[in-house]
Amino acid sequence: MPACEDAVFGLGNSSNGGDIECNVGGIGGPHPAGTGKRDRLVLPGGTLVDINGNVGEWAGDLFNTWSESCWSRAGIYRDPSCEVVSPSLGRAHAARSGGWVAQPASLMATSRSAYPTNLPVVAIDLGLRCARYGL
């Protein structure tokens, strides 16, 4: 599990139900890109930062639970995307990873959350992950 300095997470308060509190005495919110010491991936063309934490990633597909039609088949999924409305939750959008309020388990690559698509404000720690490759 990451420590507080590894990535931007746990900056809410202890009332968010988690066991990690990285924001003792401070103010929560997203941080400048690259703040987490271990949250980076070095590639031949440069470095990717904030792969997890800071803001959760609003994904381009709908949310289904692991047992519903989008994710229930066995095997490896290539470029997975779900366009099927969840039978149990209705129309909900998918978000990946965790943001600055999240607890460590939300930073796993497999972490997904459901957000109803009809909410005017979705979440304070949800956004987009922007990437640029090359110059």
Image (cartoon, helix red, strand yellow):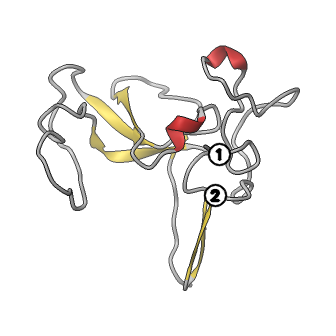
SS under mark 1: loop
**56 in relation to 27, above or below:** below
- Asked where in the image residue 47 lies, by quadrant, the reply is bottom right
Residue 34 % position (x, y): 70, 60
Residue 23 % position (x, y): 79, 31
Q: Amino acid under label 2?
A: Asp
Q: Amino acid under label 1?
A: Pro
Q: Residues within 10 Å of mark 1 (few under 14, many from 20)?
A: some
Q: Position of 125 compared to 91: left or right?
A: right
Which residue corresponds to mark 1?
Answer: 2
SS under mark 2: loop
Q: Position of 99 compared to 65: left or right?
A: right
Badge number at residue 120: none
Furthest residue in direction top, as rendered? 15
Residue mark closest to the camera, 1 vs 2: 1
**2 in relation to 90, above or below:** below
**82 in relation to 66, above or below:** below
- Residue at 41% across, 40% down: 95
Q: Can you say which quadrant of the picture contains the N terminus?
A: top right
Instruction: Please tell me which residue lies in front, 78 or 89.
Output: 78
Q: CA distance from mark 1 to mark 2?
A: 9 Å
Q: Can you say which quadrant of the picture contains the C terminus?
A: bottom right
Instruction: Please tell me which residue lies in front, 112 or 6.
Output: 6
- Asked where in the image residue 77 lies, by quadrant, the reply is bottom left
- Residue at 16% across, 41% down: 70
- Residue at 23% across, 33% down: 64
Circles 1 and 2: CB atoms closer than 8 Å:
yes
Which residue corresponds to mark 2?
Answer: 39
Q: Mark 1 or mark 2: which comes first in sequence?
A: 1
Residue 114 % position (x, y): 36, 30
